[in-house]
Amino acid sequence: MALKNTRLNRTTRGLLLGAVAAGAIMIPAAPAMAQPFSAPSVGSSSVQATPVASSTGQAAANAAQSKVGSPYVWGATGPSSFDCSGLIQWSYKQAGKSVPRTSYDQVSGGTSVSKSNLQPGDVVAFYGAEHVGIYIGGGSVVHAPTEGDVVKVSPLDSMTFSGASRY
């Protein structure tokens, strides 16, 4: 049985073609827009999505990464050389946020974050807050290690984790 070429049939066909065209445009973008998801544990009554880095934190992480290779100089706060806390302070300044100068104050100044919940931009303390770096994701931090070295990216677990803070 052939469908009549009625106004309703033409409208339905137009809507269907429009939906297919819109879907063809949106399908490739969907994976990029999807957010990581953590499944709830057994007995859990709520579902929580994996947190996404704040734009300020991501901007600070990007700024810190832009200084990889810059020399470590004790007491330096940039823009061409840094000590560990100077790198943190400079990076956050580039992101439009003021943070304290010393590693101890930087870690205690924000909101405490567990190691398992780190996001790009979080200030990570090592060795009892004697040293700090900025978490950049993927289990890595960017930091200014010590005299005679340069700003570099290192595995988070290559140093003794003491705590983390989010601004």
Image: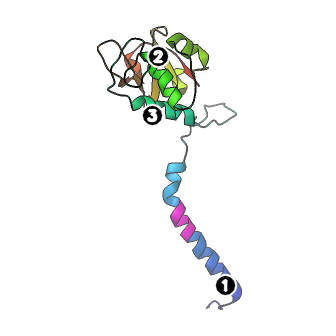
Q: Report, in whole angstroms, how far the alpha carbon at label 3 lies from the one at label 2.
A: 16 Å
Residue 111 placed where, x, y %? Answer: 62, 21
Work out whether mark 1 precedes mark 2 in sequence or the reverse, and give the earlier one: 1
Asked whether the residues under the numbered discs 1 and 2 touch, taking CB atoms below 8 Å apart as contact, a structural biologist would say no
- In the image, the segment drawn in magenta is 21-26
Residue 15 lies in what quarter of the image? bottom right
Image quarter of the N terminus: bottom right
Compared with residue 73, is residue 151 higher up or lower down, i.e. above or below?
below
- Residue bearing mark 1: 9
Q: Mark 3: give few (<14), some (14-19) or many (20+) Cα within 10 Å.
A: many
Residue 53 visible in this rendered orientation of the protein: no
Majority secondary structure in the magenta region? helix
| Residue toward you, 133 or 47 | 133
Residue bearing the label numbered 2? 85
Residue 53's place in the image compared with 69, above or below, is below
**Residue in the picture at 37% in, 21% down:** 81
Q: Residues within 10 Å of mark 1 (few under 14, many from 20)?
A: few
In this rendering, would 63 be left or right of 108? Answer: left
The residue sitting at 35% across, 28% down in the picture is 68
* In this view, the mark in front (1 or 2): 2
Identity, as a three-letter code, of the amino acid under mark 3? Asn
